[in-house]
Amino acid sequence: MARASSVLLAGLLGLSAVLLGACDRQSDSGGMILSPVNSSFKNTDVTGLGYARDFQLTDHTGKTRALADFKGKAVVVFFGYTHCPDVCPTTMAEMAATMKQLGQDADRVQVLFVTVDPERDTPELLAKYVPAFDPRFLGLTGSPEAVDKVAKEFKVFYQKVPGKTPGSYTIDHTAGSYVFDPQGRIRLFVRHGQGPDALAHDLKQLLGGSA
C-alpha cells in the first residue's frame, strides 16, 4: 500500500510540473476542466461556467471597476504582469492585432489586463504599459488580497519565482484569457498562442448576437 501511495504521489507531482511551468511555459487553463469547442467558435466554449463571474478592482486611472461597467461590450480578461518577459507582451500584442481586425467593432470590445503582481505594478506603471498596446485597453490592480480574491474567482494560478535579487522575481501564472459577451455572460476560454484570427472570429460572433 505504501508503494502504491508513493507511485500515486509521484504521478500527481509529475502532472503539476506539466501544468505549472515557468513564465514562458504557463498553464493555459489553471487546472480548469474545459468543455469541447463549440462548432461555431474557434476557441473553447465555456458558456454557463460556474466561476469567473465578476471582479472588483481599480483601473489604471484610479476608477473602481466591475464587470457591469462594460455591459454592452464584449470583455476579454487576461491575467499577467508588466515584468513578464514573453507570454504577457505576446498576448497583449495579439489582442491589439485582434482589435485592428475588428475595425469599427473594436470599440465594442474591452480588453482588461489584471495584474498578478500588485507589489510592482502600480497604477502609474500599468498606465504606461497597458495602453501602449491599444489606448482602449485597461489595466486593473488592487491590494494583494483583492487581486488574490479575483484570481481565485477565475481559478487563475500565480506564484512568485525568486530571482537573484528580491525585486527580480518572475511569476508563474495561468496564460489563457476569458471572454464575456455583451450581456456579461462568460462565453469563452482562449488558450495562449491561438493568434488574433481566432479571437477576432469569435468576437464578431458574440458582437453580432449569432452565438
Image: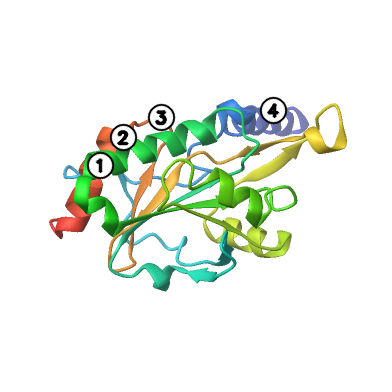
How far is mark 3 from mark 1, CA to CA? 14 Å
| Mark 2 neighbour density, 10 Å: few (under 14) some (14–19) many (20 or more) | some
Q: Which mark is residue 200?
A: 1
Residue placed under numbered mark 4 in the picture: 10
Q: Earlier in the sequence, mark 3 or mark 1?
A: 3
Check disc 3 and give the amino acid type.
Answer: Gly
Nearer to me, 39 or 175 = 175
Residue placed under numbered mark 3 in the picture: 193
Query: Can residue 115 be seen by looking at this rendering?
Result: no
Nearer to me, 173 or 129 = 129
Q: Earlier in the sequence, mark 2 or mark 4?
A: 4
Image position of 182 (left or right of 112): left
Q: Earlier in the sequence, mark 1 or mark 4?
A: 4
Check disc 4 and give the amino acid type.
Answer: Ala
| Mark 4 neighbour density, 10 Å: few (under 14) some (14–19) many (20 or more) | few
Check disc 1 and give the amino acid type.
Answer: Ala
Quarter of the figure with the C terminus: bottom left
